[in-house]
Image (spheres, rainbow, N blue to C red):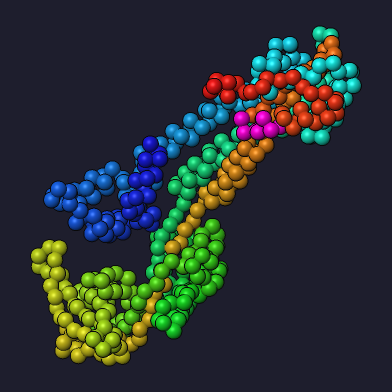
């Protein structure tokens, strides 16, 4: 079920984290999703709008934070914990308790990886000891039932490494839960010289970020070579951090990461009211889209007039800024257009055409877009990664091997038992060749493995 949910989350557009706790941002993101999927038709029927509404109700556009997905992750975590607790005593017993002396049936040549050297003397056990020590086996010797037994064990306790893998999975889920519960993410757009709070206004010891300078140098062909922000962070009126950030090189402070994410046009405007008083001077961010063109909005201070700005170009390529003045309509939820005008860079509007206000486009500038994140689960995720990888490496590359040898009445019997990831055939053949050379004797063994015999 988690795999299916992951596919849904990968295929469908997901609402960004910062919008999940902001109703207005969520509505804007959902409107953008409607714009993508609403044209969808099936058998001539327009199913897009209804599909988006149903998918939103099911949480398909926020899969990885949906309550049902969190429930599945919790169920998985509990399952892994229970499985680990269930397996651990058995794994420990298998590693801790060994049986050196095995009965004759254990060495039956009809079983896999069994061999017998006939007509050997008591020195044969010394050959076995030397061969196994060369292969880094830890040896135990025991006399029992009229025979001498030698037991060799390699990577005895590494079977427990599977617990590291389980621990890694649990820590991954715990880290994700910690980030989901205590983490924070927001997106901030800053014009040149602008500041903005990181968290809601009124938050104790809140951080403020300031765009000291933004640069987006271009190549000879007009494409952007880079974009950087000289970013300062303030707390309680004091600058606490500053760095020129770029993509993949964020600023870190107090558990927060300040990532350079995007940029766009921001036009420096001045507005004088009908009496000539300056009521606005600063950048207006064109962070929206209107018919594919950059669009921004501001309310003229001290008035009920909203100013909609759209950046376009003339046929000759010169920039032009379209201005639309709007006011609330008598009809609830609608607006009236007060004026329409256009400005070229460096020019001012005619107050007679713009409701008595003089609007000047002083300078073309740019805003920087930052993603600000606090991820308290990040350290746990790294520990989980190391635990998971360590467990997998130890389990797959160091499987346990065990060798038993029994000297009885001139016969040396040898048996190997190994975990499934070991190349048992190669290891046993290599050991037998070594012993055959030392003992100057060829072993008796079954001619073909049981799997081949079964296949035949």
In this view, the residue farthest toward the top is 145
Q: Quadrant of the N terminus?
A: top left
Query: Can see residue 452?
Result: yes
Number of disc labels: 0
Image-quadrant location for residue 330? bottom left
Q: Residue at x 43, y 66 (%)?
A: 261
Q: Residue at x 26, y 74 (%)?
A: 293
Q: Residue at x 23, y 75 (%)?
A: 308
> In the displayed structure, would residue 301 be above or below residue 432?
below
Q: Quadrant of the C terminus?
A: top right
Query: Can see residue 391?
Result: no
187 lies left or right of 49: right
Q: Which range is magenta?
A: 420-427
446 or 133, which lies in front?
A: 446
Residue 301, position as x, y percentages in the image: 27, 77
113 or 24, which lies in front?
A: 113
> In the displayed structure, would residue 101 be above or below residue 317?
above
124 lies left or right of 204: right
Residue 426 located within the stretch drawn in magenta: yes
């Amino acid at each position: 079920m988690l795999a299916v949910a992951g596919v849904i989350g990968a295929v469908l557009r997901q609402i960004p984290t910062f919008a999940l706790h902001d109703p207005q941002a969520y509505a804007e993101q959902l409107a953008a999703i409607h714009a993508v999927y609403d044209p969808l038709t099936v058998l001539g029927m327009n199913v897009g709008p209804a599909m988006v509404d149903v998918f939103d109700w099911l949480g398909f556009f926020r899969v990885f934070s949906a309550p049902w997905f969190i429930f599945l992750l919790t169920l998985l975590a509990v399952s892994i914990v229970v499985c680990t607790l269930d397996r651990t005593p058995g794994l420990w017993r298998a590693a801790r308790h060994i049986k050196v002396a095995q009965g004759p049936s254990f060495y039956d040549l009809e079983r896999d990886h069994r061999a017998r050297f006939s007509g050997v003397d008591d020195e044969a056990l010394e050959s076995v000891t030397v061969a196994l020590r060369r292969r880094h086996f830890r040896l135990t010797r025991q006399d029992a039932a009229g025979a001498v037994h030698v037991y060799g064990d390699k990577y005895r306790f590494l079977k427990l490494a599977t617990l590291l893998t389980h621990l890694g999975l649990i820590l991954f889920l715990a880290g994700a839960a910690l980030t989901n519960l205590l983490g924070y993410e927001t997106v901030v757009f800053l014009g040149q010289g602008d500041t903005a709070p990181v968290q809601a206004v009124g938050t104790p010891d809140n951080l403020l970020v300031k765009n000291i300078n933004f640069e987006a140098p271009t190549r000879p062909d007009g494409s952007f070579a880079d974009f950087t922000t000289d970013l300062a962070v303030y707390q309680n009126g004091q600058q606490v951090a500053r760095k020129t950030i770029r993509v993949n090189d964020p600023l870190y402070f107090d558990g927060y990461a300040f990532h350079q994410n995007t940029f766009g046009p921001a036009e420096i405007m001045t507005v004088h009211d009908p009496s000539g008083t300056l009521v606005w001077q600063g950048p207006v961010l064109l962070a929206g889209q209107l018919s594919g063109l950059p669009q921004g909005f501001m309310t003229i201070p001290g008035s009920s007039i909203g100013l909609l700005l759209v950046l376009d170009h003339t046929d000759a390529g010169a920039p032009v800024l379209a201005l639309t003045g709007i006011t609330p309509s008598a009809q609830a939820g609608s607006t009236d257009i007060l004026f329409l005008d256009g400005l070229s860079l460096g020019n001012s509007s005619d107050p007679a055409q713009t409701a008595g206000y003089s609007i000047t486009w002083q300078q073309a500038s740019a805003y920087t877009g930052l993603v600000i994140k606090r991820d308290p689960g990040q350290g746990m995720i790294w520990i989980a990664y190391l635990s998971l990888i360590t467990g997998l490496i130890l389990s797959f590359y160091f499987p346990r091997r065990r060798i038993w040898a029994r000297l009885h009445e001139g016969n040396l019997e040898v048996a190997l038992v190994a975990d499934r990831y070991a190349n048992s055939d190669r290891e046993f053949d290599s050991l037998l060749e070594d012993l055959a050379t030392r003992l100057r004797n060829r072993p008796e063994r079954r001619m073909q493995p049981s799997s081949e015999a079964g296949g035949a």
